[in-house]
Image (cartoon, helix red, strand yellow):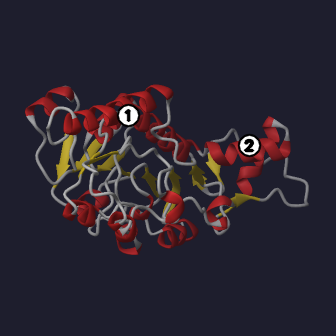
Amino acid sequence: MLITWSGFTSVGGMNTDLVDALPVSLKVIGLPHVGYDHFDWEAIKKRGVIMCNSPGMSDNDVADIGLHLILSTYRSTSLFESTLRSQKNAALARRVVLNFDQDTGRADPGNEPMDPMKYVHGHRVGERVVTSPAGQRVGIAGFGGIGRALAKRLHVLGMTIHYFKRSQLSQKELKSLEGIPLVRHESFESLAKESDVLVLALPLSSSTRHIVNDKTIGILPAEARVINVGRGPLVDQAALLRGLKSGKLSGAGLDVFEHEPIIEEELLSRYDVTLLPHIGACTQKAVERALINSLENIKNVVVDGGHGIHPI
């Protein structure tokens, strides 16, 4: 069975009832993506069905989106784009951000004429100074293919790379990162304390659900940023909003969401959050690679009598 990207999402995923209805002849399920948290894996396994996913097919594509989100949170590009579209004037767009409201995440131009002496070149948003990512510490939680691809990009920007991964990197993985100084952390909490920008590239499990919450936001450095290119429920979005309103967080970049495909109105209305509709892996080449990999997984089981190239 080849399951496409949207397969079974409209009915809440492949749960136990659906698994029980699968034909006894089914031997293998091929997924053209990495995540499988919306599949009842235990029930599938009990049926003796092999399920394979497609890891590594879009690591660079997701890392590109991660890089975009990080740059946006540092340079406040979503906010500046919104003011430019509303003001229709480049000079006014830069000045309006001085009226940034921390509580709403918006820059209200107000009804009064702006003070001509309060000119700004884009180096401030409200009382906050706009900074470059160079020299900042990025903490990458989940240092698989996506995390390592992102580390290479951020090293070029001059960022210090910290990461959390339960297992040690292999010699092959270390060689691919040769020349990039790395700081490994033994725990997620240790990583958070050292992360000016925290990037989530983790799978979703019972131990990682809401791994970003009020407690972890509290131990992040002042004015930290949170980026999620992993799975939506890694972040407690209510806690994220509290962090933004309080000023503890200076921004966030999200390609995935806790209640996807529904996005909370409060997130949509804030311009200190850069939002993308889960497009990290969505390039034509990545789609082709994932589909070919899925078919090769199925062939390995059905034709060659194997256990799949990428069995879960």
Query: In x, y percent, where is residue 24?
Result: 27, 57
Q: Is residue 306 above or below residue 262?
A: above
Instruction: Residue at 38%, 43% (x, y): give it.
Output: 2
The residue indicated by pointer 1 is 290
The image quarter in which residue 233 lies: bottom left
Q: Secondary structure at mark 2?
A: helix
Query: In x, y percent, where is residue 29?
Result: 31, 48
Apparent side of residue 296 relative to residue 276 in the rendered image (left or right): left
* Residue type pointed to by label 2: Arg
* Residue type pointed to by label 1: Ala
Spatial separation of the CA atoms under disc 1 and disc 2: 43 Å
Is 254 or 71 nearer to us in this picture? 254
Query: In x, y percent, where is residue 172?
Result: 12, 30
Give the label, 1 or 2, closer to the camera: 1
The residue indicated by pointer 2 is 94
Is 242 or 14 nearer to us in this picture? 14
Q: Which of the two discs, 1 and 2, labels the residue nearer the N terminus? A: 2
Apparent side of residue 111 relative to residue 130 in the rendered image (left or right): right
Instruction: Residue at 31%, 50% (x, y): give it.
Output: 139
The total of numbered circles placed on residues is 2
